Amino acid sequence: MTGENLADAIEANTNTHIRAFVAEWAAITLPDRIEVVNAADDARLIREALDDGTLLPAGAGRYYSRSHVTDTARSEERTVVATADPADRGVYNNWRLASEVKHEVTERMRGASRGKTMYVVPYLMSPPGTPLEAYAAGVELTDDRNVVLQMIRMARVGMEYLSGLADPSMFVRGVHVTGDLDTLGQGTAADQRLFATIADERTILHFGSAYGGNALLGKIAHGLRLASYDGRRSGKFLAEQYLVLGIVDCETGERRHVCGGFPSASGKTNLAMTLPPEALSDRYRVEFYGDDIAWLWVDEQGQLRGFNPENGVFGVAKDTNTATNPTAMAAIGEGSGAIFTNTAYNELSHDVWWEGLTPEPPADTEGWLDWTGAPIAERSLADTNLPWAHPNSRFTISLDQVPNIAADVHAPEGVVIDAVIYGGRTRDREPLVRAITDAAEGVYDGLTLGAEATFAAEGLDGQLRYDPMSMRPFMSYAEGDYAAHWLEIIGRVTEQPIFAHVNWFQRDEHGGYLWPGYRENLRALLWLSDYREGRATGRRTAVGVVPHPDELDLTGLPIEEARVEQLLHIDTARWQEEIAHRATHLEQFVRMPGEIWTAHARVAAALNEPSPASPPGAEAPDRQANR
Ligand code: OXD
Ligand code: MN
């Protein structure tokens, strides 16, 4: 690539810092061409992809793509956070020294884009004009057109989003090079893949994958890992793997915003996109803001505010259907521009299918190919039980396709956050909902979030795989410092959001779910609003306030009283076991603040008190305090 070609390829409105960044990496990766992308290029890029077969038509303005069979998910063990400061080493962030990692990835990227186009994707991970905009600007260089198409759906893409930068050199520098996926030795000792966030240099270097979670650098690497690092370094904000939704009471006009973290496979996208229960749908409206990431800060009035930095949804297809997530089904409908990845595909009808879309796969297998491209009709008997779609198959759509999108989803001021919820997947112990009024105890609850391991054979059944704040794979610095930063941010808030823990997954003695889940989950969040506003008093327990059974609005839900009581029961003995596990979990982390240990000790002591700890509705003064 000559200097002249480069100058031609990069439009005049790129700033000199962007040009220098592109030139530096083009000289390393050696692409044949360079192309600067804008969201308006989507139709042309789609046409090119259909022409060369990297996308296939999926009916009425929708598209299908298949990834390399070894490249279907995020690779946590190959993902590192690197800085110059060893104090950034945490338990989960695979910390490494920046100088070493940069060198290693750069060597792997050398000449690896030969024969390809380097797309320059300028983007913003924020609605334009937010107070955090300076941390949201990025430029991703990628050698994969499908990555560009997905970025256009997931972020605000175009040079215009970067033209007004207060500091034109302040953008995240992201380089994505796919590499030869046939020769990377995925999963072996010689694995060449390396996904590095050089956090203190605001640089992301990902080599060896074209899968969304590894290759859409705006989403996880910038939107979560780097933003969470920036949030602490600047002292200004939090970046969390949280959903954001709004609940509107159409009778009173009350509008509440909830954000929260859920470990994967705990129903976060379904909850984010939920609708009210059928019987309450005249009264309430649920508004969608985001299903995966929230950036949170405290405004000048002392209110906790948040927005979804993404502009789209990269949702797991498996089990998405008209009952579990009617919103997603509508959003991926005709004309949506959806891109499906690694679902099953019918090469004749151009339909897509995944496990759970319908109870049974299509009866007529003619034309159906599984996610690897193999014809279903030709499967051997031994393969008949293999899934048609990859379990991590995905749909990618932009936010504006979601039918109940909130009108203010792009508002630069974000929304005031009224509640922060955590939800794991727990078969007994965790009640349907418990409210936590003390902020440090809320942060402690987030740090001890987890989903149940199912290692019955190892004797671990019922024990959690902890996933603090649902950030375990995205932590960018030491967990104790992360907890301190949370306490610092939440300590600035004058009107605290309420914290809560929810659990939709309790089982009865036969293994069946006690709670119907899905749209009915809103009933727990409505109680939370009632409790916060003083319309419900709840019952104080050692681990928070649970609803009195008659405080849950169960209109139109046939459910026995005994079952509701079971859903709200606190099993002290099981909780005491959990407290011991939590202590071991928290002890791993350096510099865990004293306030977190105090919250832990308070809950542990309350569990040892004779029960009930106090008459229903009564609150010990320390629990009424905002902090
Ligand atoms: C994830 C995602 O991997 O959101 O968490 O895609
Ligand atoms: Mn996620």
Image (tube, rainbow, N blue to C red):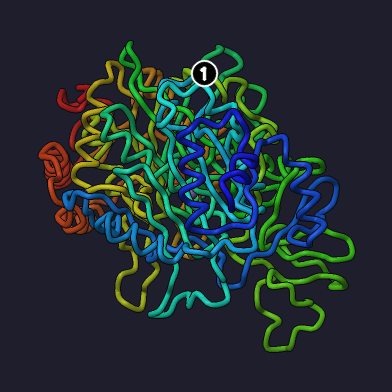
Looking at the image, which residue is at 44% across and 66% down? 108
Number of numbered markers: 1
Q: Is residue 65 visible?
A: yes
Q: Is residue 183 left or right of residue 342?
A: left
Please tell me whether residue 253 is drawn above or below residue 288 in the rendered image.
Answer: above
Residue 613 position, x and y percent, is 18, 37
Left or right of 593 on screen, residue 536: right
Give the residue type at disc 1: Arg
Please provide percent x and percent y for residue 541. Answer: 25, 38
Q: Is residue 612 above or below residue 357?
A: above
Q: Is residue 110 above or below residue 554?
A: below
Q: Position of residue 389 (x, y in %)?
A: 67, 66
* Viewer-closest of 6 and 166: 6
Residue drawn where x is 72% and y is 34% of the image: 40
Q: Characterize the local packing of mark 1: few (<14), some (14-19) or many (20 or more) Cα atoms within 10 angstroms.
A: some
Q: Mark 1 — residue?
A: 255
- The one nearer the camera, 441 or 347, is 347
Residue 181's place in the image compared with 215, above or below, is: below
Viewer-side residue, 270 vs 230: 230
What residue appears at the point 39 percent right and 55 percent down from the top-left corner?
426
Report x, y in % for residue 343. 69, 62
SS at circle 1: strand
355 left or right, relative to 237:
right
Q: Quadrant of the C terminus?
A: top left
Quadrant assignment, res 64? bottom right
Answer yes or no: is residue 530 visible.
no
